[in-house]
Image (tube, grey):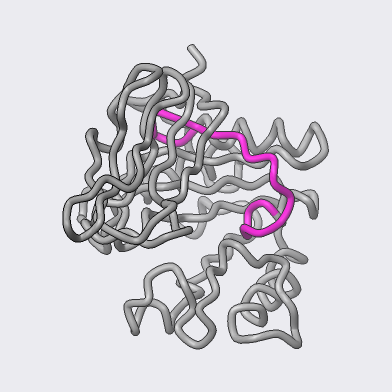
Amino acid sequence: MPEQVVGNIIIIHPLNISGFENRTMSVVAEDGKNLNRIFPGDPDGTEGDKICHFLVTAFFSQADFYIDLHAGDGYESLNPYVYYLGAAAAEVVAQAKAMAQKVNVPYMVRSDIASGGAYNYAGSCGIPSILIERGGEARWSEAEVALYKADVKNVLHHLAVLGGKVKANENKPVDISDVVYENAAFTGCWYPRKKSGETFKKGEELGVIKDYFGKLQQTCIAKYDGVILYQVSSLAILRDEPMIAYGRIDH
């Protein structure tokens, strides 16, 4: 209810409207750029650059905290988790981590990148920020929407922007470190051996790429014990594009 709000809550609709309408997924249809890679943008650049620059100048200048809601790409399966910024002043990082701990997901990842993504760049501007990952494969469900709403409300309770008590979630996020973001070295067919969210041991085969005649081109071997955060779920996979991301569970 409005009377429970202290201060102002700014809700921003999806930024990449053309990508949504044209089903180009994570990239802007007009220029093929991923908004989560080009912050702070450029007022004299292409469509994606201008969108990022607008968000920085019109929104970040007004924000004290930032929550970014994301999902796996249209061809990615994903296990829910949350990023919190790490490339910022110590007190900003601490505030961001405290926000992440109020999200109902099993894992959280510290990101030590200061630009590229919106929440990364917000951190370099002194704004405690998180990015929640839930859903993917161009699908959605009422249950996931409800979980997202509950996450946002719980973080707002924690920040005292919204009246009410912080709820104890089913999940208490555990830190994931040494995240490996492995791209495909070949265009071909991807055969994952496990599902997103599954754990594995060092040396296990996580998936292979074969050409269209069944010839083995690439094998993905786990560098350590860990868990799969997300991976390509389509049969088709493209050279130099994402294949799998996994990390080490910090018990």
Which one is in front, 154 or 177? 177
Left/right placement of residue 227 relative to residue 14 reads left
Region rendered in magenta: 102-120
Residue 204: % across, % down: 32, 22
Q: Position of residue 49 (x, y in %)?
A: 66, 78
In the rendered image, residue 145, in percent from the top left (x then y), is placed at 29, 54
Q: Name the foreground residue: 213 vs 153.
A: 213
Front one among 55 and 234: 234
- Above or below residue 18? Residue 226 is above
Residue at 31% x, 51% y is 232
Whether residue 250 is situated above or below residue 185 in the rendered picture: above
Q: How many marks?
A: 0
The residue that appears at 39% across and 43% down in the rendered structure is: 244
Residue with the most extreme left position: 213
Along the horizontal axis of the image, is 203 left or right of 213? right
Where does residue 165 sit, x and y in percent of width and height? 48, 32
